[in-house]
Image (cartoon, grey):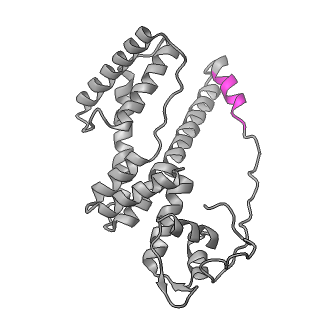
């Protein structure tokens, strides 16, 4: 297929395809003329993964290049999933300024709590995992803000998380190709996580309204009254027009369609 067809099939603008190729993210097509090339299905798969990493995952070009290299070297589905999981940003709670001694004590306490939780659940995650570090940071902030926080409450949430993780992996069980699996992993981690959080909030809203209906008290009523849709719709963004067939614009020609890469 020509570059214009590759753009239509993947939803990636031609200018972005050229940019990704110059950055070493996308292999070159088979040259058919001085300024033309043919692309195959492997290019379409690669572009979908690049788009998922850069738009859904929010990764930089350099980070995307590293992830693609890891995926290319992964010979198992676990290796591909691990490369994606460790590459995507980990939510880390903002921390207020604290003295060195207080900070060290809070870090040690939260770290010990995470280690104890992982041991109790028999989860296999090394201390160097960015997810372990992110959870430690989040618990440290939770301790500062929630005086009623009880460490034992985490186990119940962790068991629910394990059920969700099993569902995630079951959805990817039929994918053997590392590139397709990596794309699925980005979608699951970057999109399904917010979806799951919204489902959780909807479930909370449902529970609040049920308690209000059953005479649950003033606090539940106030929460229910506040949980109204804002009615704001996001503005649509139209893709920029691009030169369709030629691989590169001749020197001196105006850069028509050279928009910001996806």
Q: Residue at x 43, y 11 (%)?
A: 100
Whether residue 221 is in magenta: the answer is: yes
Q: Residue at x 47, y 76 (%)?
A: 28
**51 left or right of 14?**
left
Tell me if residue 81 is in the magenta stretch.
no
Image spot of residue 217 (x, y percent): 63, 18
Q: Where does residue 58 sit, x and y in percent of width and height?
A: 54, 50
Name the residue located 44 percent from the left edge and 58 percent from the top edge: 65
Up-down relation of residue 238 to residue 127 (above or below): below
The answer to whether one can see residue 51 in this image is yes
On the image, the x and y values in percent for residue 182 come to 40, 60
What residue is drawn where x is 72% and y is 70%? 257
Extent of the magenta region? 220-228
- Count of residue discs: 0
Q: Main secondary structure of the magenta part?
A: helix
Residue reaching furthest bottom? 33
Query: On screen, 34 above or below 76?
Result: below
């Amino acid at each position: 297929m020509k570059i214009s067809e590759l753009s239509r099939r993947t939803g990636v603008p031609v200018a972005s395809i050229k940019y990704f190729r110059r950055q070493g993210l996308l292999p070159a097509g088979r040259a058919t003329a001085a300024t033309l090339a043919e692309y195959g299905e492997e290019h379409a798969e690669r572009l979908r993964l690049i788009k998922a990493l850069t738009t859904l995952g929010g990764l930089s070009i350099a980070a995307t290049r590293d992830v693609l290299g890891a995926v290319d070297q992964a010979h198992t589905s676990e290796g591909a999933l691990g490369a994606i999981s460790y590459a995507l940003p980990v939510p880390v709670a903002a921390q207020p300024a604290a003295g060195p001694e207080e900070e060290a004590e809070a870090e040690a306490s939260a770290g010990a709590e995470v280690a104890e939780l992982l041991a109790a659940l028999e989860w296999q995650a090394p201390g160097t995992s960015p997810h372990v570090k992110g959870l430690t940071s989040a618990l440290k902030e939770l301790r500062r803000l929630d005086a009623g926080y009880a460490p034992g409450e985490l186990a119940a949430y962790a068991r629910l998380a394990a059920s969700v993780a099993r569902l995630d992996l079951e959805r990817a069980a039929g994918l053997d190709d590392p590139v397709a699996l990596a794309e699925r992993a980005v979608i699951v981690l970057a999109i399904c996580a917010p979806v799951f959080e919204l489902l959780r909030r909807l479930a909370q809203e449902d529970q609040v309204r049920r308690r209000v209906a059953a005479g649950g008290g003033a606090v539940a009523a106030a929460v229910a009254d506040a949980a109204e849709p804002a009615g704001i719709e996001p503005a649509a963004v139209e893709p920029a027009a691009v030169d369709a067939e030629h691989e590169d614009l001749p020197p001196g020609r105006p850069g028509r369609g050279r928009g910001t890469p996806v």
